Image (tube, rainbow, N blue to C red):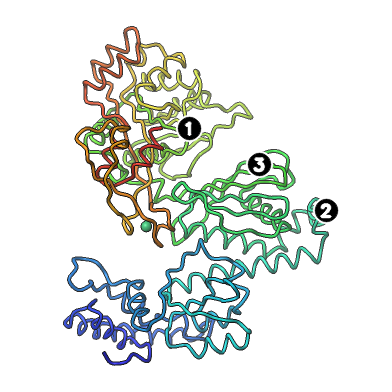
Amino acid sequence: MPELKKLTFENLAHLMERCGLLSRDQLRDVLVRGKAQEARLFSGRHVGATRRTGTGSELSSPAEILSSLHSEIKGTQGILLTEDIITEALASATGLPYFKIDPLKLDLHVVTDHIPRPFALKNMIVAVEESNGVITVAVADPFNEALVSELALARRLEIKRVLSSKSDILKILREFYGFRASVVAAEAEASTSIDLGNLEQFFKLKGHQELEGTDTHVVSAVEFLLNYAFDQHASDIHIEPKRETSLIRFRIDGVIHNIHVIPKPLHAPIVSRIKLLSRMDLAEKRRPQDGRIKTNFNNKDIELRVSTVPVAFGEKVVIRVFDPDILLQDLDSMGFYPRELALYNSFLRRPNGIILVTGPTGSGKTTTLYSSLRSLSSPEINIVTVEDPIEMVMEEFNQIGVQQGIGVSFDSILRNILRQDPDIIMIGEIRDRATAESAVQAALTGHLVLSTLHTNDSAATIIRLLDLGVPPFLISATLLGVVAQRLVRKICPQCKKSRILTADESAYLQLPDAPHVVWEGEGCKECRGTGYRGRSGLFEVLDMNDRLKALVAGSVDLAAIVEAARQEGLVSLREIAISKMLEGVTTYEEVISMTG
Ligand SMILES: [Zn+2]
């Protein structure tokens, strides 16, 4: 193997062929297409001559160009040669350890304290770990040894090099240095103008008029934080004041991760900025408030629902991120089994009646409702939603927010909107008798009504309606069907391994015909060591057919309803969860934690 001395596109392509990732024919093809790509980028550089950094660092690297050609790995069907795989191969050829950067595991101080930003950006390097005085520096070019020794000498550091992809390094440089710069500047500003210990005074001195105009560093710190959360697909952002610090945490796939610890004096300005963006009352700090922010990330609108609550050491902020890609899905990609999906679609096609979606908080009910409405929406259909609060603002629906404080309740809105001639009505949640009655009234007068209820399974929903005072004959006259749903975490495809269910586990799930093969994730870089990536819905669908209608109209008995529903083909959430486990979608542990 000829010695590799310089990182050029040509060298890299040949290396891929030598390690067996590309065939000879592929190599020839890649060389031709890569050269053309390089030439295009090169001419692009001259056109956009006024580049901000003035260095070539942000131009595509050989590995980026190679991965942009979307070549298949030799002998595979459809597995692409990605920048990560190329980098891993390059690492092994040059003897450097390969390092997949996990932004959630990086420490802001380690990243930003040792290497000045311009130097890092110019040379595409980033400090990723520090232990016992040794700094681990990720580099994109394995042949920049001299440069790193220079840095070690100049800053009196002991440096160990590892190889990472340029895209990963650049992402960290942008996110961390930006955030760091904002925090440092804001800290400096806060400490020169006020007594750090006295945040009350801070606000008295500055007032919110001034806060708005001057704290540009706080503004950019918040912006970086939000973008970072979107990039990590966080569903919630928590900003929690502690005695000495403020803790920033993200929820990703249902699990909370600690992200940053920021100095306490910055907590209040950051909270103020968020409150300002969500149009809350800045002066009000003793009562909980709600607001929303509409923003844009990677050319898609993202809606944030913000709430503040006073806690012992200040105001705690929780931001829920409503990503339209998650909130609006195709019904057939949400995890329904074919039988359940067909039933549910048959409910949606009915001209009038009530469809209920049930499950605990966080089980994805809103996603199901919004996605259903989206599938029904067309210019000639008038869809009205009544929500508390409006989860996500969507142009094709007429959405009305409940405001209990001023007497605008679910049932008062419902009475009014019936005059506005809606075809389909979505009620955020049926919580009380008046709302239940309005829903029934709407269904009886020819509307399709979709709503949610807080119950555990589909049959229990009927009992809950009775408890809310809906007479049995009206339930059987209006209810089309009930969907009970849950979310389970999906096994990470990258580190999925099979095992045999133990005899005890099989017995616990009452599974006959042991042994059974199940799967679980061992934990890898892609899933941050959790073994899970993304979530899948489980849907139990109860069809209110004639037999059930007759049963409900008589004397209602839960056991009899369940029995009849089972005979009519109802598959329970537990059975659906077990099927998903046996199919390798989720784990035994998820089934247990979901079914209790
Ligand atoms: Zn994994």
Seen as rendered, the residue at the extreme front is: 503
Q: Quadrant of residue 33?
A: bottom left
- The residue at the point 56 percent across, 68 percent down is 176
Find the distance from the CA under tag 3 to the CA under tag 1.
Answer: 25 Å
Q: Amino acid at mark 3?
A: Val
Q: Amino acid at mark 2?
A: Gln
> Residue 346 placed where, x, y %?
25, 31
Observer-nearest of 26 and 469: 26
The residue labelled by disc 2 is 201
Q: Amino acid at mark 1?
A: Val
Of labels 3 and 1, the one closer to you: 3
In the rendered structure, which disc, 1 or 2, sits on the residue that comes first in sequence? 2
The residue labelled by disc 3 is 309
Find the distance from the CA under tag 1 to the CA under tag 2.
Answer: 42 Å
> Residue 586 placed where, x, y %?
32, 45
Q: Is residue 149 left or right of residue 97?
A: right
Q: Is mark 2 within 8 Å of ligand 1?
A: no
Count residues near mark 2 (Cα–Cα under 10 Å), then give few for <14, some for 14-19, many for 20+: few
The image quadrant where one finds the C terminus is top left
Which corner quadrant of the figure contains ligand 1?
Answer: bottom left
The residue labelled by disc 1 is 386
> Residue 95 placed where, x, y %?
38, 82
